[in-house]
Amino acid sequence: MRTDDVDYEVGGGRVMGERQVRLVMTSREVSISAESGNEVLRYAGICVVHVEDGKPVEQTWVPLGASPTSADDEALIATWRAALQWRQACA
């Protein structure tokens, strides 16, 4: 997975036991066999990262197409909402 320099964090500071949620623009590459040799397909997406005590503990990758659909938006919103609920459960 390649991570670009786009990172959004909810919950600041470095307090022990604190949970944070980060949104990171990423892309994933998949190598497939083709008649002309191996080809690499690249998919853009957003990785929702759960961070506890400054360390990633879980991540969910949500594909982000060139022309996102309502279903794409809803998948991201549901993932983001679950991550925020996880973060709030610590408070």
Image (cartoon, grey):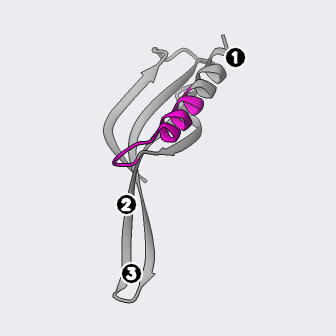
Q: Quadrant of residue 90?
A: top right
Q: CA distance from mark 1 to mark 3?
A: 45 Å
For this view, does 72 lie left or right of residue 16?
A: left
Along the line of sight, the residue nearer the viewer: 91 or 39: 39
- Amino acid type, label 2: Arg
Along the line of sight, the residue nearer the viewer: 47 or 91: 47
C-beta proximity under 8 Å, tags 3 and 2: no
- Element marked by disc 3: strand
Q: Nearer the viewer, mark 1 or mark 3?
A: 3
Query: Mark 2 highlights which residue?
Result: 42
For this view, does 84 lie left or right of residue 36?
A: right
Question: Which residue is farthest bottom?
Answer: 35
Image spot of residue 39 (x, y percent): 36, 76
* Of the image marks 1 and 3, the number of the one nearer the N terminus: 3
SS assignment for the magenta stretch, majority: helix
Query: Mark 3 highlights which residue?
Result: 38
Image spot of residue 58 (x, y percent): 61, 38
Query: Mark 1 highlights which residue?
Result: 89
Label 1 neighbourhood size at 10 Å, few (<14), some (14-19), many (20+)? few
- Amino acid type, label 1: Ala
- Element marked by disc 1: loop
Residue at image position (54%, 22%) is 20
* Of the image marks 1 and 2, the number of the one nearer the N terminus: 2
**Highlighted magenta segment, given as a residue range:** 65-80
Image spot of residue 77 (x, y percent): 53, 29
Quadrant where the C terminus is found in the figure: top right
Question: Which residue is farthest front?
Answer: 70
Q: Quadrant of residue 82?
A: top right
- Amino acid type, label 3: Asn
Residue at image position (53%, 40%) is 71
Question: Which residue is farthest left?
Answer: 5
